[in-house]
Image (cartoon, rainbow, N blue to C red):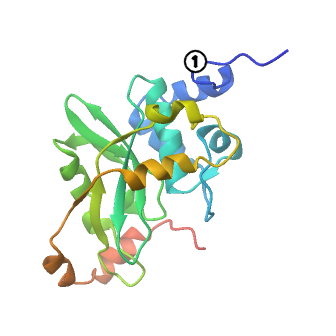
Amino acid sequence: MPAKTTPFGLTPAEARTLRALSTPAKIQKFVDSIEYQYADTAMSPRRVLRERKGHCLEGALVAAAALRLNGHKPLLMDLEAVRDDDHVIAIYRERGLWGGIAKSNFAGLRFRAPAYRTLRELALSYFEHYYNLRGERTLRAYSAPVNLARIDKQNWMTSEEDVWCVTDLLIAARHYPIVPDKVARELPRLDRRSFEAGMHGRVAH
């Protein structure tokens, strides 16, 4: 007899787990608790729930799924970098203000309370915390919101295969520059104290 599923294709147990993450802060706590992995994967929320591991994209996906089951749209935003990895965050809106949930190996690239009037403000809140191992400030652009409901037919929440359809959407999304090129070329490197603070809790490759 096949297992019962929710409208999104999740099992009742999966849906209960995600619904129990009833606030953005609870979702972030769960995302923090899963093991950080270095892998060329794009695991669905189902696989993340089962394997309890993931990188930034996978953390954002499970966060988007939990937000959805608690009444929010499943929205992602891509943060685009140079000489560094891009970063993906799940975004949410409360009382007209934006916040973010994210899995990251860097302490400052994770949760944002809903305090930002625009997505640009939200993206800028990550700027000082976004740097590479050479201490270069690397964040350059942010994307328009990507609504994952657009690819429900590709089973992004439950697929056993990697959901590269999500990355395709993120790449195709319109991106907006954060700093002019001339300013970016002259940015100073991060000071040692700030660098070390952001590395707190980092999992080595």
Q: Can you say which quadrant of the picture contains the N terminus?
A: top right
Closest to the observer: 104 or 57?
Answer: 57
Residue appearing at x 62%, y 57% in the figure: 41
Relative side of 88 to 119, left or right: right
Placement of 41 over or under 20, stated as above or below: below
Counting from the top left corner in percent of width and height, residue 197 is at 37, 70
Residue appearing at x 39%, y 85% in the figure: 134
Q: Can you say which quadrant of the picture contains the C terminus?
A: bottom right
Counting from the top left corner in percent of width and height, residue 117 is at 16, 41
Closest to the observer: 103 or 191?
Answer: 103
Where residue 76 sits, quadrant-wise, is top left
Where residue 94 sits, quadrant-wise, is top left
Residue appearing at x 64%, y 28% in the figure: 14
Counting from the top left corner in percent of width and height, residue 133 is at 42, 80
Residue appearing at x 27%, y 83% in the figure: 189
Q: Residues within 10 Å of mark 1 (few under 14, many from 20)?
A: few
Counting from the top left corner in percent of width and height, residue 69 is at 48, 24
Placement of 10 over or under 198, stated as above or below: above
Closest to the observer: 104 or 156?
Answer: 156
Residue 32 in view, yes or no: no
Amino acid at circle 1: Pro
What residue is pinned by disc 1? 7
Relative side of 43 to 74, left or right: right
Residue 133 in view, yes or no: yes
Q: Secondary structure at mark 1?
A: loop
